Amino acid sequence: MPPRSKRFSTEAAPGDSSLSIRNVTVLDQRTSVRMEEEMWQALLDICAREGRSVHEVCSEIARHKPGPASLTAAIRVFLLAYYRTAATPEGHRQAGHGAGADVVAAVFASGGEDGAYASRPLGRPVGPASSRGPV
């Protein structure tokens, strides 16, 4: 196992972990969160969209998470729930979901040569306003 300084580095060598560790202040306590870079980008996108800091959003997640859940797990569940709430039937249709295409390959291919997920700005959800929550 690599030394601790290498295991928690944000600059992983080939074959090392793809997780990035960042410091976040949650409920007035500084803590470290270790997630994939794509998760960090999704969290930053949500924070920008909602006009709140990473610290504020993570503090809210900590307030609402089930007691035994880790903060990192709760953040990942929040990210999934946020985007699922924004998804609409029309948005899925426009993205070509359900048309028999290999959706997994398409998502990975959209990230370029290294296979990383694409970091694209997300537009407002499409569809009737009554079918989605606040944006």
Image (cartoon, rainbow, N blue to C red):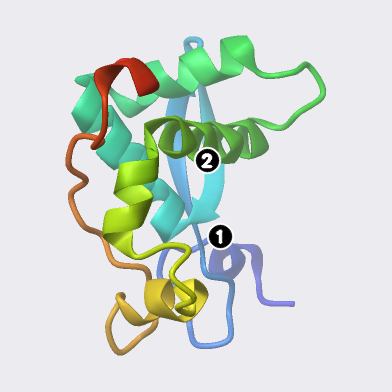
Q: Where is residue 7 in the image (x, y as percent from the top left)?
A: 60, 67
- Residue at which label 1 appears: 8
In the picture, the quarter occupied by the N terminus is bottom right
Q: Is residue 90 above or below residue 113?
A: above
Q: Using the rendered view, name the quadrant where residue 43 is placed.
A: top left
Question: Which residue shows up at 34% across the image and 55% down it?
Answer: 93
Q: How many labels does the image show?
A: 2
| Along the line of sight, the residue nearer the viewer: 104 or 21 | 104
81 sits left or right of 129 in the view: right
On the question of residue 135 being in view, the answer is no
Instruction: Tell me which label, 1 or 2, sits earlier in the chain.
Output: 1
Residue 84 shows up from this direction: yes
Residue at the disc numbered 2:
80
Q: Residue 36 carries which label?
A: none
Residue 55 placement (x, y as % from top left): 38, 22
Q: Reply above or below: 41 against 128.
A: below
In this view, the residue in front, 10 or 3, is 10
Give the spatial CA distance, label 1 vs label 2. Answer: 25 Å
Numbered disc 2: secondary structure:
helix
* Amino acid beneath label 2: Leu
Q: Which residue is drawn at 23% across and 37% down?
A: 126
Q: What kind of residue is marked 1? A: Phe
Residue at x-position 21% and y-position 57%: 120
The quadrant of the picture occupied by the C terminus is top left
Answer above or below: position of 110 versus 133: below
Task: From this view, report whether residue 90 is shown above or below residue 125.
Answer: below
Q: Residues within 10 Å of mark 1 (few under 14, many from 20)?
A: some
